Structure formats: structure tokens, C-alpha cells
Image (cartoon, helix red, strand yellow):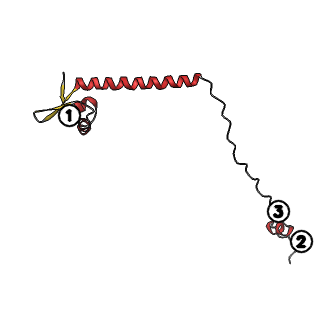
């Protein structure tokens, strides 16, 4: 059984010491006090990690199996939802000729008489 200080364990798992102390407080890792300082039991924690990994793997396999079985069974056709019919935009009234003339500016006429 290998026991490490919090600092050494933090370096081993590439975390901060503060994180390791939080892990001890939350009991996610096994630790004990020796001479007033915490020691982390690496072997027990390794077994915990292996156990958590195996459980996660089993859960993932179960999810995968349910996905595969769902894909193998034919699914009923789903009818598309009816959407509300869009109302056509109201037709615009044609412009009056006088309004059209105001909108189109004609260039001024050039005088054909010679200036003296």
C-alpha cells in the first residue's frame, strides 16, 4: 500500500492541492491523518477509479444496446405538423399618374436659341 502526501498526490494526478483537499472532504478519495497531516492511499483510490470506470462502461454499453435495438425496430411514420397558412400580402393600389410624375424628375430642357 502506497501512501502519499496531499502535495505529492496532487502532482501525481495533475491537480492543485486545494482540489485534493476538496476531494478528501467530499470523500471521493480515501485519505487518513498521520502525524496531523493527510495521507492519500493511492492503491485504494486506484481501485475506486477502476470501479467507477467499470460502472460507467456498463452504463455506456446499456445505452448503446438500447440505441441499437431502437434502430433495429421500424419506427411508425410521423405525420408532419400542419403549419398555419400564411395570408398573402395585401395588393397595393396602383399609383396615380400625377404621383408618378412627381417621382420622376426630368432634366431641364436646353434652350436652342443662341445667347448674344
Q: Please give the name of the residue rendered at 57% of the width and 24% of the height, measured from the top-left corner.
A: 71
Question: The C terminus appears in which quarter of the rendering?
Answer: bottom right
Callout 3 crowding tier (Cα within 10 Å): few <14, some 14–19, many ≥20: few
Instruction: Using the numbered discs, state the Cα–Cα distance from disc 2 to disc 3 in whole angstroms.
Output: 41 Å
Q: Nearer the viewer, residue 93 or 58?
A: 58
| Residue 107 in sight in this render | no
Spatial CA span between label 1 and label 3? 82 Å
**Vertical placement of 97 versus 26: above or below?**
below
Q: Secondary structure at mark 1?
A: helix
Viewer-side label of 2, 1: 1
Q: How many marks?
A: 3
Nearer to the camera, 6 or 65: 65
Query: Which residue does the image show at 76% across and 53% down from the upper left?
Result: 88
* Residue bearing mark 2: 112
Residue 14, percent across and down?
A: 28, 32
| Disc 2 element | loop
Q: Which quarter of the rendering shows the N terminus?
A: top left
- In percent of width and height, residue 6 lies at 20, 33
Residue at figure coordinates x 80%, y 60% from the top left: 92
Residue tagged by mark 3? 93
Among the two numbered marks 2 and 1 on one chain, the one whose residue lies closer to the N terminus: 1
**Which mark sits nearer the N-terminus, 2 or 3?**
3
Q: Position of residue 17 (x, y in %)?
A: 23, 37
- Name the foreground residue: 1 vs 60: 60
Amino acid at each position: 500500500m502506497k501512501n502519499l502526501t496531499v502535495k505529492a498526490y496532487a502532482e501525481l494526478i495533475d491537480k492543485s492541492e486545494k482540489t485534493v483537499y476538496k476531494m478528501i472532504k467530499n470523500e471521493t478519495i480515501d485519505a487518513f491523518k498521520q502525524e496531523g497531516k493527510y495521507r492519500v492511499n493511492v492503491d485504494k483510490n486506484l481501485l475506486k477509479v477502476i470501479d467507477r470506470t467499470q460502472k460507467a462502461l456498463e452504463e455506456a454499453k446499456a445505452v448503446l444496446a438500447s440505441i441499437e435495438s431502437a434502430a433495429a425496430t421500424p419506427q411508425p411514420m410521423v405525420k408532419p405538423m400542419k403549419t398555419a397558412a400564411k395570408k398573402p400580402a395585401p395588393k397595393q393600389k396602383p399609383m396615380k399618374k400625377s404621383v408618378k410624375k412627381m417621382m420622376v424628375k426630368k432634366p431641364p430642357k436646353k434652350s436652342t436659341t443662341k445667347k448674344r
